[in-house]
Image (spheres, rainbow, N blue to C red):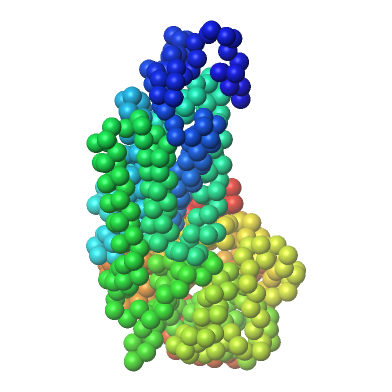
Amino acid sequence: MIDPQASAPPGSPQPWDGPDGPRRDDAGDAASAGGPASAVPLPVRQGTGRWLVLAGVFVCAACGLVYELELVALAAYLMGDSVAQTSVVLSVMVFAMGIGSLAAKRLRRHAAAGFGAVEAALALVGGCSAMALYAVFAWTGDWGGVWASGPRCLLVAFSLATGLLIGAEVPLLMELIQRIRRQDAGGAVADLSAADYVGALVGGLAFPFLLLPLLGQLTGALITGAVNAVVGGALVLGLFRRDLTPRARRLLLTANVCVLALLASAAVLVDDFERAARQALYGPDVRVAVHTDVQEVLLTGGRDGRPLNLFLDGRLRVDGRDELRYHEALVHPAMTGRHARVLVLGGGDGLAVREVLRHPGVRRADVVALDAGLVRLARTDPALSRLNAHSLDDPRVRVITADAFDWLRTAPTAAYDVVVADLPHPGITASTKLYAQEFYGLARRALAPGGRLVVHGGAVRSRPRDFWTVDATLRAAGLRTTAYRVRGRQTGFAHGPDRGPADTAAAHRDWGFVLAADRHTPRPRLDPAGPRPRTLTDAALAADVRAAERTRVPGLPPSTLVHPRYGD
């Protein structure tokens, strides 16, 4: 960058008359800046000042992206992981950024004070968003219904407010950097954009790999807000303090101190808050709550005669009162015929393989589970390991920590007599690929001739299109299918093993399964030479097939990786 003072001929107007003199920009400079130019005496050299502003842009951009990802993660955690909800949060935020940029034009004459106020507000809103939303979720539980419901409107309101404040940053920073040293608009935009995009990259990588695993959502958001407040306040009060009136300096300093004090107090109390919120959400019997590398794992009950419940990222995956009925219905109808070699996809809790091992003809059972932390808990937690009968420690069992889809791509061909897919609901975005035609094609390749594949397809009555899309997708993969539906207890799972803790008791309580084979249409029945399940009979299974068939939705297209067909 060429210094205009060094390049100007003798006698020409200079950018500065003196250390505190007025700026003498010509008409062209003022026009190119889009507004009046005023001299900003700096406590540092111009080059250092520009570097400090760009460093501030870098940090603020990183914080802004963390706020965005935090809201997306909360939307997924609290309301269900779906493309639709993620799209709503991001689109509202991007829209608000545009409105914020337009609104910031009115603050350009007071760019320093305006930027300081925007950063203080952004630090407060972004830093407290996770705690506020989690509090509303825990103490109201009202996340069902349409987007107009109160808590969902609060999420949209936080997205809107955060986007407005992020959008207001760039015009004000553009004005500040031009006041340090006038340059063409294209060059200034390029400099700011480079710092902004690099900061966004750092924030985007820091959230999943640093903040979330080490600090969690609540503490991570609070610390990000504190960093935002410190950097924004220091930039304005340090570099542009002469551009502020004494009253503005006092107000800005007070605002930043109050924001930092509030964020610090919340950080000190965050553990107590999280315990209280968990008790409000899951009841007073929370026994284990850990964040693994993959998800949040929470256990309630399991002692003093209370049933064990397992929640993964807020969704009930195991209900101790009803899990036996679910896992017997999942496993035993598929074990008729050869079953020496069994593959369990998912099932890191060890409950599905427990039922597999009840059949004496099983010689090997491979469990492909994504979360090593859950597997470790299933082996070491006294209540959970007792419930799964220490199945993961059986010498016939081999546990493989891997993504099921990726692992199947390299799995040996025709290696298994039975494949059990004990996976989360297909409407969860992260699981959609595990219910795609490509996935079932890989599973079919791993089946030995005449082998059987059983899939949990979710609730039949409450989500019939999703369930019958699973059936249509299996058929598109070249498998013959039979669907059956098993009812749970009135106190059991509300949506199968994927409901949230706030789901109401009015939800339909049934589980849908699809049994598939490559050479014949399989008939769900029990192995005459196998163990007798406590909750199933052949007559009941025949009735379950008829009950599922009555809900059939015909003509559904299969779900593929590039065109998923499941809703949330």
Q: Is residue 113 above or below residue 548?
A: above
Q: Which quarter of the rendering shows the N terminus?
A: top right
For this orientation, the residue located farthest to the right is 413
Residue 376: tell me if it is visible.
yes
Tell me the residue at 53%/8% (across/down).
12
98 sits to left or right of 344: left
- Corner quadrant of residue 331: bottom right
Residue 348 on image: x %, y %: 55, 76
- Corner quadrant of residue 369: bottom right
Q: Is residue 2 above or below residue 74?
A: above
Q: In the depicted view, which residue is nearer to us: 247 or 66? A: 247
Q: Which quarter of the rendering shows the C terminus?
A: bottom left
Tell me the residue at 55%/59% (across/down).
209
Q: Is residue 309 above or below residue 442?
A: below
Q: In the depicted view, which residue is nearer to us: 241 or 435? A: 241
Q: In the depicted view, which residue is nearer to us: 320 or 164? A: 164
Residue 346: tell me if it is visible.
no
Tell me the residue at 57%/61% (across/down).
434
Residue 456 on image: x %, y %: 50, 69
147 sits to left or right of 317: left
For this orientation, the residue located farthest to the front is 18
The number of numbered discs placed on residues in the rendered structure image is 0
Q: In the depicted view, which residue is nearer to us: 413 or 504? A: 504
- Corner quadrant of residue 523: bottom right
Residue 422 on image: x %, y %: 53, 72
Residue 180 on image: x %, y %: 47, 27
327 sits to left or right of 302: right
Tell me the residue at 45%/48% (across/down).
63
39 sits to left or right of 556: left
